[in-house]
């Protein structure tokens, strides 16, 4: 058993060069994920979560996207320098991905079965007949009733939840070692959300795949993840095991995020928010990117960018004021 | 699928009625008296009057129309005033060549247009894209008669590569192919531009969609992503466009056939109108309209085949 993580993102930087301006979508992001573990990546819209996950698949559209630095090591190999043909073999093979929009992520002109079979045919040398059987087996595995009929259905004949199940079946068809789920439940209503999360947890247990779950929903993270990375404006601001993060959040942004989750046991008139908004990726920031919204911000925060440092083993924070008292 | 075809057929009935009405009305309005044409230049007024009465041309217009309608429904389109053959037999002789011309035109221009449009989309903004778009603008802007004349001038006369008069025989013979080449090339030229443009924009549109990202995430090669997940979906609006362009195809066939003396429906129609051969002109217009309806029906069926969402 090696200790090397399955996925190790180190100092990743992704930029978008649009009309002469450089937008730094992701800057210095590091995270790692061991086999069989689930990593939650949280943050609000525009914080670089999706770009990070797309980067692992090397699917950030180029141009305008540019991988400006860092490394993404998957099983010891740097994906950013891998030849395209080898990268293709990983995509859909050892790395599966589920997207946020089940309604539009399947091709409307092919049956659900055919879309899974296509992925199987690319990555294995199954006969068409065997591929079909395997596709039906996958649809059964993700809990679609009468999978044999569903395989012949077109995406528009299924509901959003069913389509997301098809997407999961598609992502898992080739038994990937890593499953990247980019907000897999955001577009679904709450009951279906719970079903899909249960399904993913169940399948992870069965296949032993590592899961990277991108979400903005802290509830989802608490329920499903072993470790959490909190991102803000293209940076990792805090990373910790889930229990530690929820028990003792250290970054003011994490604290703010948790305070913003409405509680069922307290009556409030207005929900708590973090004042201000995420700085746009083209803005030039010196110092901490959260300083403009941070209640603790000091002169040092506005001039010097805090590095991510470990407070305790496995719990890193990028804040000059950490450790703070758990007061929020 | 079957109900769709039946529906289309039912919808074509009022369209055909309109075509018959317009075809009839236009020829009533056009100067020229068929009775005089039939009687010949030396006939006395008595003879002309007699012929007019025989043909029912002295009846009120609506009576003429409904008796015409009744005859059409029985498959009787009358006789040509010039050749005295039945209109049906004249049309039957001309329909094959015209169908061949349309097939020969579409079979090269549509695939080429789609291929060029896809290439332009893939290499968007580059030299290939700009060259293809320049060609397609030229194709859209040049009038069909001009293209025909240039073909005759250069390919036919100057370089003497291909014959440019008449028809050489059925499409599957060498002579037939040689004769149909220039008309088909000229007529197809007006198709490439619109098809290439529509394909380009449609492919660009589709390649931005989420399901294309899914296709890439499956590890498919870029070629496969573009052809199977981009082009396949992008063809849906292209097919619609081809249906809309069917009118140009029919109109273009009239011009092309006339210029190349190609013995099809188009040339028949022009000849009939120029010589005031009313029954033949009406018949030719009817057939051209039928062709238009038929092309659109094929397009609708193709549409349903391409997009499963249309069927349910």
Image (cartoon, coloured by chain):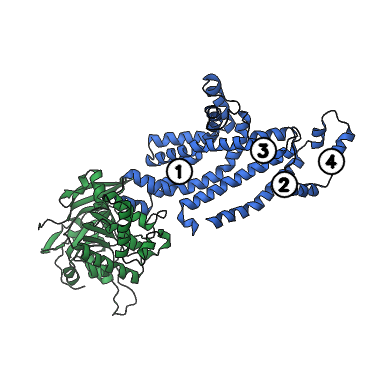
Q: Name the residue under label 1.
A: B199
Please check whether the numbered discs 4 and 3 fall on a single chain.
yes
The tag on residue B91 is: 3
Q: How crowded is mark 2: few (under 14 residues within 10 Å), some or many (20 or more)?
A: some
Locate residue A56 relative to residue B248 in the image: left or right.
left
- Determine whether A254 is above or below A116 in the image: below
Image marks 4 and 2: residues in contact by CB distance under 8 Å:
no
Instruction: Determine the colour of chain B.
Output: blue
Q: Is residue B110 left or right of residue B214?
A: right
B178 sits left or right of B227 in the view? right
Check if mark 4 and mark 2 are on a common chain.
yes
Q: Is residue B46 above or below residue A37?
A: above
- The residues bearing labels 4 and 2 have C-alpha atoms spaced at a distance of 18 Å
Q: How many labels does the image show?
A: 4
The quarter of the picture where residue B53 lies is top right
The residue lying toward the viewer, choosing from B152 and A80, is: B152
């Amino acid at each position: 058993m090696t200790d090397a993580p399955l996925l190790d993102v180190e100092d990743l930087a992704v930029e978008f060069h649009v009309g002469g301006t450089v937008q730094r979508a992701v800057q210095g992001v590091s995270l790692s994920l061991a086999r069989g573990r689930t990593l939650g990546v949280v943050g609000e819209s525009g914080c670089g979560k999706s770009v990070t996950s797309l980067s692992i698949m090397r699917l950030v559209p180029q141009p305008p996207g540019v991988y400006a630095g860092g490394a993404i090591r998957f099983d010891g190999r740097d994906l950013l320098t891998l030849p395209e043909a080898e990268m293709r073999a990983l995509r859909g093979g050892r790395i599966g991905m589920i997207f946020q929009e089940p309604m539009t992520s399947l091709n409307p002109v092919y049956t659900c079965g055919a879309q899974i079979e296509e992925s199987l045919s690319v990555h294995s040398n199954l006969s068409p007949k065997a591929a079909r059987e395997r596709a039906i087996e996958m649809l059964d595995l993700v809990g679609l009733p009468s999978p044999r009929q569903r395989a012949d259905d077109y995406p528009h004949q299924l509901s959003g939840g069913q389509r997301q199940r098809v997407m999961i079946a598609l992502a898992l068809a080739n038994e990937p070692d890593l499953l990247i789920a980019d907000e897999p439940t955001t577009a679904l209503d709450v009951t279906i959300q719970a079903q899909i999360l249960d399904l993913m947890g169940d399948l992870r247990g069965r296949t032993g795949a590592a899961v990277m779950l991108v979400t903005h929903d802290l509830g989802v993270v608490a329920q499903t993840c072993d470790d959490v990375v909190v991102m803000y404006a293209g940076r990792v601001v805090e990373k910790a095991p889930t229990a530690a993060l929820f028990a003792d959040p250290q970054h003011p942004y994490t604290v703010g995020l948790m305070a913003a989750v409405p509680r069922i046991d307290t009556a409030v008139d207005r929900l708590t928010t973090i004042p201000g908004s995420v700085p746009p990726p083209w803005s030039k920031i010196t110092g901490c990117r959260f300083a403009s919204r941070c209640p603790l911000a000091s002169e040092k925060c506005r001039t010097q960018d805090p590095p991510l440092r470990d407070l305790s083993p496995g719990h890193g924070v990028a804040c000059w004021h950490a450790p703070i008292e758990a007061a929020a | 699928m079957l109900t769709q075809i039946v529906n289309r057929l039912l919808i074509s009935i009022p369209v055909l009625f309109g075509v018959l009405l317009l075809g009839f009305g236009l020829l009533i309005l056009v100067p020229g008296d068929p009775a005089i044409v039939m009687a010949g230049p030396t006939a006395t007024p008595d003879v002309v009057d007699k012929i007019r009465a025989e043909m029912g041309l002295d009846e009120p217009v609506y009576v003429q129309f409904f008796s015409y309608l009744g005859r059409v429904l029985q498959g009787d389109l009358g006789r040509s005033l010039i050749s005295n053959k039945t209109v049906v037999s004249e049309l039957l002789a001309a329909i094959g060549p015209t169908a061949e011309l349309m097939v020969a035109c579409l079979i090269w221009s549509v695939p080429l247009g789609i291929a060029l449009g896809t290439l332009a989309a893939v290499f968007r903004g580059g030299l290939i894209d700009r060259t293809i778009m320049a060609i397609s603008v030229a194709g859209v802007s040049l009038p069909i008669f001009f293209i025909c004349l240039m073909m005759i001038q250069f390919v036919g006369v100057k370089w003497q590569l291909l014959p440019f008069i008449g028809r050489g025989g059925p499409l599957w013979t060498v002579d037939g192919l040689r004769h149909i080449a220039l008309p088909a090339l000229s007529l197809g030229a007006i198709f490439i531009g619109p098809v290439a443009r529509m394909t380009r924009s449609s492919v660009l549109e589709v390649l931005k969609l989420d399901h294309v990202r899914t296709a890439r995430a499956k590890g498919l090669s870029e070629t496969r992503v573009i052809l199977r997940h981009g082009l396949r979906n992008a063809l849906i609006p292209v097919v619609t466009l081809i249906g809309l362009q069917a009118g140009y195809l029919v109109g273009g066939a009239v011009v092309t056939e006339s210029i190349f003396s190609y013995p099809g429906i188009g040339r028949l129609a022009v000849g009939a109108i120029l010589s005031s051969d009313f029954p033949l002109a009406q018949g030719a217009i009817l057939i051209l309209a039928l062709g238009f309806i038929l092309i659109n029906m094929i397009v609708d069926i193709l549409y349903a085949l391409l997009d499963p969402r249309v069927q349910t």
